[in-house]
Amino acid sequence: MHALRGLDLAVPEGTVCGVLGPNGAGKTTAVRVLTTLVSPDSGSATVAGCDVVRDPAGVRARIAVTGQYASVDGDLTGAENLRLFARLLRAPRSRTGELLERFGLADAADRPARTYSGGMRRRLDLAASLIVPPKVLFLDEPTTGLDPRSRNEIWDAVRGLASQGTTVLLTTQYLEEADRLSDEIVLIDDGQVAQRGTPAELKALIGHYAEVTVADATALNAAAAVLDRLTGSAPVLDPERRTVGAVTTDTTLTLPRIVREADAAGVPLLDASLRPPSLDEVFLRLTGRAPATASRLETTA
């Protein structure tokens, strides 16, 4: 079995590319190949103008990598961690203070890293990756296991890096994360690129999502019949939430029309909405399964 097979990626300079796929999709393996940690059996890959096989040293000199888990030393302070990296990379010591300020860690600079929150440790890890400013930054599932506040802190840091011209390749399981950060998103399915485009372009592929909430669960089927007629798509019923939803590509469909049609059919509504689809719904529509339950995917770099 191949861990990577058939994945074709091209990321423009100074942009963020989000690569989406479930656990076992091969995202981490792709990052390991592109960062010269693993040699591919076949195919080719170039990073910042350097071939990963013929010129691995050139690649390493131009990139930085932040993996799924923070690699900082918990017994060292934040400042000591950065000074250690600066010494190893022969970078100016002044970078330590600059990066601590930049990532909001100056007040905690003299505390051991083991006392940091998850979000602070990840920010320190990112700062360490930037001791020598890279042309390309690889972020492999950077917010795995973090709470919402810590995830937002990392997102702010990534947006700041991208705004300053760093090219970022982001692998993630979180569609919201890709939606918030990426200039382009690549959806992977069965070892190949299922679709690619901006978040807005991917959402436009399946139009809008109409959803109604009924007052009585016995009205679910009647509500489904209304949405089926209006959208031409198979409705999805959720008895627990008492909701019925369906995708529509009909640009003339309006929320008032949905409410009128439901009223005419005698369907008691508590709520109704017509909104752009989430990326979860895009993934489900394009691949036939939700990201969280998708089977193992195989990819290539």
Image (cartoon, rainbow, N blue to C red):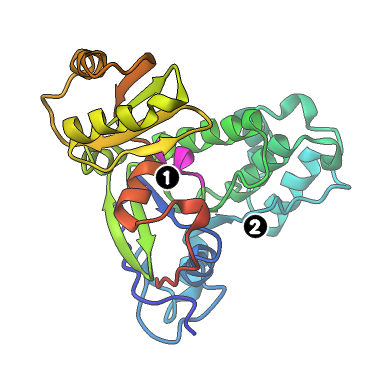
For marks 1 and 2, the one nearer the N-term is 2
> Left or right: where does residue 211 sit relative to residue 204?
right
Q: Amino acid at mark 2?
A: Leu
At 38% across and 25% down in the image, what residue appears? Answer: 219
Which x, y percent locates residue 17? 38, 49
Closer to the eye: label 1 or 2: 1
Contact, CB < 8 Å: mark 1 with mark 2? no
Q: Relative to 272, is 192 above or below?
A: below
At 38% across and 69% down in the image, what residue appears? Answer: 190
> Left or right: where does residue 87 sit relative to residue 162?
right
In-front residue for pair 227/96: 227
Q: For residue 89, which numbered disc appears in the image?
A: 2
Which x, y percent locates residue 58? 46, 69
From mark 1 to mark 2, how far is it between C-alphas?
19 Å
Residue 99 location, quadrant? top right
Secondary element type, mark 1: loop
> Left or right: where does residue 210 sit relative to residue 108?
left
Residue that badge 1 annotates: 166
At 37% across and 63% down in the image, what residue appears? Answer: 189
